[in-house]
Amino acid sequence: MNQDDGSPKYVTDMIFPDREGGYLKGHETRELILRTALSIVIERGYKAMSMRGVAAACGMKFGNLTYHYRSREDLVRELMEAVISSYEREFETIMIMPGVPAEERLRRLCMLLLDDIRSKKTTRFFPELWALSNHDQFVLERVQDLYVRARAPILEIVKEMRPDLSDAECEIVALFISASMEGMTIFAGYEKPFEKRMPELEHLAVLSFCNLVKTLAPGELAKTR
């Protein structure tokens, strides 16, 4: 769904990666598996997402599941790819809006992400990954890659707005904006204590981020080192 101005209203759950060859039924089966895996993580947590548990929830034999995904790591890798691809599509919609100034695109991008935090999927899926990444190197690497890709459009806009800042300065600003938004999940996400006050938090966040990008003095961050 889109807003009247054409910018995305929210992020779809997943965009399924294309695979070369194979039958339509095979693609449909993989989509079923990924949707089921995501649902299990959202409703019961990552630990409940075992290969046998996913197979049972899909109503298929374990051997049929391993035909499509040989290991849990393969399944997690493609699940995260499907999730981040949905964000990248919406980011692209905002980034290529003709005639829209960089500051306005930053505002719309932040609003999209902050609105998305209030969804059940986002509030439950990503914190599960954060917790697991503390103990699982494979998930840690996947999560880091996911956020590098998620920060990319923010970094692009910051560089466009502030060509006088160094690459390192732009990168830390983009990281700060991304981290600040993600941190709101536990306070104002789905069914969290301040969910109803997210519109106020969104306003403060976007105002603060835009002012930061516009007013940060070149070299100012170097003074903190």
Image (spheres, rainbow, N blue to C red):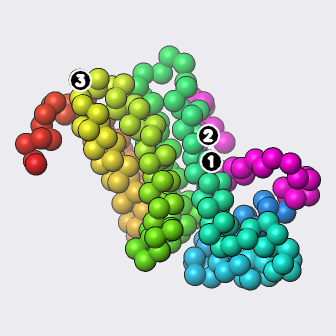
- Between the C-alphas of marks 3 and 2, the distance is 29 Å
| Residue 216 visible somewhere in the drawing | yes
Q: Is residue 195 visible?
A: no
Q: Amino acid at mark 3?
A: Asp
Measure the alpha-carbon separation of dots 1 and 3: 32 Å
The picture places residue 125, in percent across and down from the top left corner, at 55, 66
Q: What residue type is disc 2 on?
A: Arg
The tag earlier along the polypeptide, 3 or 2, is 2
From the viewer's perspective, is 217 left or right of 196? left
Identify the disc placed on residue 89.
2
166, above or below 83, in the image: above
Residue with the most extreme top position? 99
Q: Which mark is residue 105?
A: none
Q: Which residue is mark 3?
A: 164
Magenta region: 1-28
**Marks 1 and 2, how far apart at CA:** 5 Å
Disc 1, SS: helix
> Residue 145 in the image: x percent, y percent?
48, 53
Question: In the image, what residue occupies the spot 50% across and 67% down?
Answer: 139
Q: Quadrant of the N terminus?
A: top right
**Can you tell which of label 1 and label 3 is closer to the viewer?**
3
Residue drawn where x is 35% and y is 54% of the image: 179
Q: Secondary structure at mark 2?
A: helix
Write down the quadrant of residue 31 in the picture. Answer: bottom right
Q: Which tag, 1 or 3, sits closer to the chain's start?
A: 1
- Secondary structure, magenta segment, majority class: loop
Q: Which mark is residue 86?
A: 1
Evaluate if marks 3 and 2 touch, with contact meaning CB atoms under 8 Å apart: no
